[in-house]
Image (cartoon, rainbow, N blue to C red):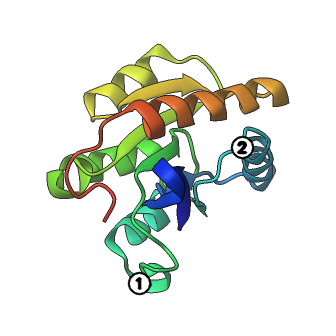
Amino acid sequence: MKTIQIQAGKTESKPKKPILVVEEEPNDIMFIRQAFQSAGLKEPLHVVSDSAEAIEYLQGQNAFDDRQRYPFPVLVLLDLRMGRKDGIDLLRWLRERPQIRRRIVVVGWTEVDLPTLANRAYDLGANSVLVKPFDYNQMVRAASLLQQYWLDLNLLPDGAQN
């Protein structure tokens, strides 16, 4: 748990805001981890390889039943185009579970600008859809902006950090 300095040497505990990355490509996962680290992101970053694993993670089932080790995320960074079970499947699942959906921010992304895919993601409740940066500096900038807006400025609903 992080602490921040406040008046006259007192400290206040600042809760962590875990991020769940749903990405199937190992090279992209490494790229994302490095860029987030370069951006100074201090929040825990957890990775699953598809929407089926993301569902298990969000429900705290199977390998993800230890919430100390696998805390409920505040932000889900979701690749919309994956092989086995893609991001649209997860958005569809979340839409049917408003008690889970309201606790997280879902940012979808994809390699190419596909308006129909973006529109479908928004229809199913994505908070934002981005084109995945392939340039390292752009990925670092994206990580920094995601943190600033969704984790620092955005007001989260009750229960989002439990």
Q: Residue at x 37, y 42 (%)?
A: 105
Give the percent coordinates (x, y) of residue 101.
25, 50
The amino acid beneath tag 2 is Gly
Q: Quadrant where the C terminus lies?
A: bottom left
Marks 2, 1: nearer the viewer: 2
Residue that protrudes farthest toward the front in the picture: 8
Left or right: 88 as drawn, with respect to 21:
left
Q: Which is more toward the observer, 131 or 156?
A: 156
Work out whether 60 lies above or below 5: below
The residue where tag 1 is placed is: 65
Specify which label sits upstream in the sequence, 2 or 1. Answer: 2
**Label 2 element class:** loop
Give the percent coordinates (x, y) of residue 7.
47, 48
Give the percent coordinates (x, y) of residue 23.
61, 51
CA gap, disc 2 and disc 1: 29 Å
Badge number at residue 128: none
Marks 2,1: beta carbons within 8 A: no
Work out whether 140 lies above or below 50: above
Work out whether 144 lies above or below 33: above
Q: Residue at x 58, y 16 (%)?
A: 113
Q: Quadrant of residue 146?
A: top right
**Label 1 element class:** loop
Q: Residue at x 65, y 28 (%)?
A: 142
The residue where tag 2 is placed is: 40
Give the percent coordinates (x, y) of residue 15.
43, 60
